[in-house]
Image: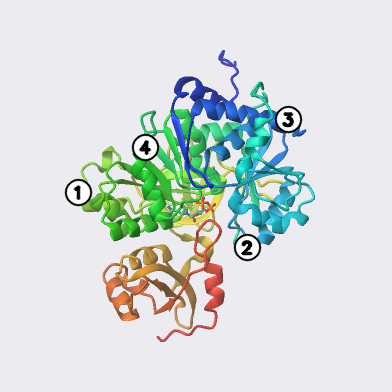
Amino acid sequence: MLGLMQDYPLLTHTILDHAALNHGEREMVTRGVEGPVRRTSLADIRTRSLKVAKALELEGVKLGDRIGTMAWNTERHVETWFGIMGNGAIYHTLNPRLFAEQLGYIVNHAEDKIIFVDLTFVPILEALRDKFPTVRKYVVLTDAEHMPDTALPNAVAYEDWIGAVDDDFEWKSFDENTAAGLCYTSGTTGNPKGVLYSHRSNVLHGLMVNQPDVFGLKSEDVIMAVVPMFHANAWALTFAVPAAGAKMVMPGAGMDGASIYELLDSEKVNSTAAVPTVWLGLMQYLEETGKKLPYLEKVVVGGAACPPMMIRKFELDYGVEVIHGWGMTEMSPLGTTGKMKNATSHLDQEARLKLKEKQGRTPYLVEMKVVDDAGDELPRDGQSSGHLLVKGPCISKGYFRLDEKTLTDDGWFDTGDIANIDPLGYMQITDRDKDVIKSGGEWISSIDIENTAVGCEGVAEAAVIGLPHPKWTERPLLIVVRNPGSEVDAETVLAYLDGKIAKWWMPNDVVFVDEIPHTATGKIQKMDLREQFRDFEFSN
Ligand code: ADP
């Protein structure tokens, strides 16, 4: 027997309708790519999104067409997403940090019809334009005054383009499982793979991250979405913030410490989210200027392990709650957050800070387990590390146009991370499965060593890779980038690690480099490092 409840498909534009009706006056503030800060409201965002949908309709865009966006976090980028989805088309985020060949691959693989592009990125697309046979129009996200003289074929300024239509458009209606968004994983090997979100998964994921033990946003909040919309769905903020009716602050191209600080301060931002490297920039700025963060209450740090030193500085020096998050593009992307819970209330400050180093526990709608090489589940004892598998309605079951089995027979997705789960449900990542270091039959956690090493004075960034060793199979090599002006040496770093990590994890050597290579989403390229140090010989 079926229930007798209404058939109300979870379509993303219902979020915007709700926001405009109930929080229409709420502001969205953007640092424009052109320079000045712009202010708009959730009601205006809806009106302009309807215009985007109508203009796309006039361009002949159809259900299921892919529309590229290569843009910073701005109100215009939000409007394009909602306009595209409200027309039944699919936003396809183009990460401008991808290599040219990868960008060429994904635009052609997706067969993008139109690309919305920010002024900053026009030159990137100009260089590639001849390689994009499917793209018939470029909409530059600016007004007539700032429109560049561009070699992009059929280029038009966004404000002119939507200015030519009215908002008399009815959102299209379709099944909630209809595709809404496409985001390619950066892929360290082979071609990028497209993760295809649906309306249903975007809506559910937006609601999921608004649970109090996750981001917990409410209408009084002012949240700055620093994590880019081209990086794994902006961690759901494009959906979660309007659903809550919170004020949204968008940093545009200003991702440096000073620009971030300026908006945090002037807009009285109380919540924000980004990867650790962004927060390192902010912390450097705060230390140089002696400024504080009087309005900020919580910061979500994820995408890479949050260094313990960062947790301590935010919490103890600036009074800001750190919510450590873990996830991946295939998970929409959020998987866990490290909020405290009732069973941790007895912990003293030191123990709580330590627990926050873990990647955290799952909200309702994410299931996870850790299994051994044979696929058997390992106990939740906080010790047994294995392959981390996940399941849920916002987790991908396959890649766009790729005929490849991606789930286990019983429907679990292997994240490629190695982790353990403790009895309270807090998960800790120890490595990527392809980066684990096997020494004498045991695993060494490169992430733990890296996290600890960045606490040493003078160390700006650290990476640990395993290299072959005649006796132990593999041993860790620590690769360090020094802070500007620092002369920290190997002995000092090793002495700092001593006592903070297991003795047998101690790196056999420390080398210093000017730069560590990163992927397009800011992760350390360990494959490149292993290649670079292929012929390195340990001194012991
Ligand atoms: P994103 O960069 O949006 O997190 P990706 O799909 O590019 O998504 O990368 C996902 C991977 O990033 C995870 O599988 C994990 O290895 C790593 N990662 C994400 N968050 C964390 C975290 N808090 N700690 C450690 N690793 C993390």
Q: CA distance from mark 2 to mark 3?
A: 38 Å
| Disc nearer the start of the sequence (1/2) | 2
Amino acid of disc 3: Glu
**Residue in view at x 65 percent, y 34 percent:** 84
User: Which is nearer the eye, 82 or 121?
Assistant: 121
| Disc nearer the start of the sequence (4/3) | 3
Instruction: Say if mark 1 contacts mark 3, CB within 8 Å.
Output: no
Q: Position of residue 406 (x, y in %)?
A: 63, 49
SS for callout 2:
loop
Q: Which numbered dot is residue 189?
A: 2
Q: Position of residue 27 (x, y in %)?
A: 44, 31
Q: Which numbered dot is residue 57?
A: 3
Q: Which residue is mark 4?
A: 213
Quadrant occupied by the C terminus:
bottom left
- Around disc 1, counting alpha carbons within 10 Å, would you say few (fewer than 14), some (14 to 19), or many (20 or more)? few
Instruction: Say if mark 4 contacts mark 1, CB within 8 Å.
Output: no
Amino acid of disc 1: Asp
Q: Which residue is mark 1?
A: 348
Q: CA distance from mark 4 to mark 2?
A: 35 Å
Q: Quadrant of residue 420?
A: bottom left
**Residue in view at x 26 percent, y 70 percent:** 499
Amino acid of disc 4: Asp
Residue 426 visible in image:
no
Number of marks in the rendered image: 4
| Disc nearer the start of the sequence (2/3) | 3
**Residue in view at x 29 percent, y 57 percent:** 289
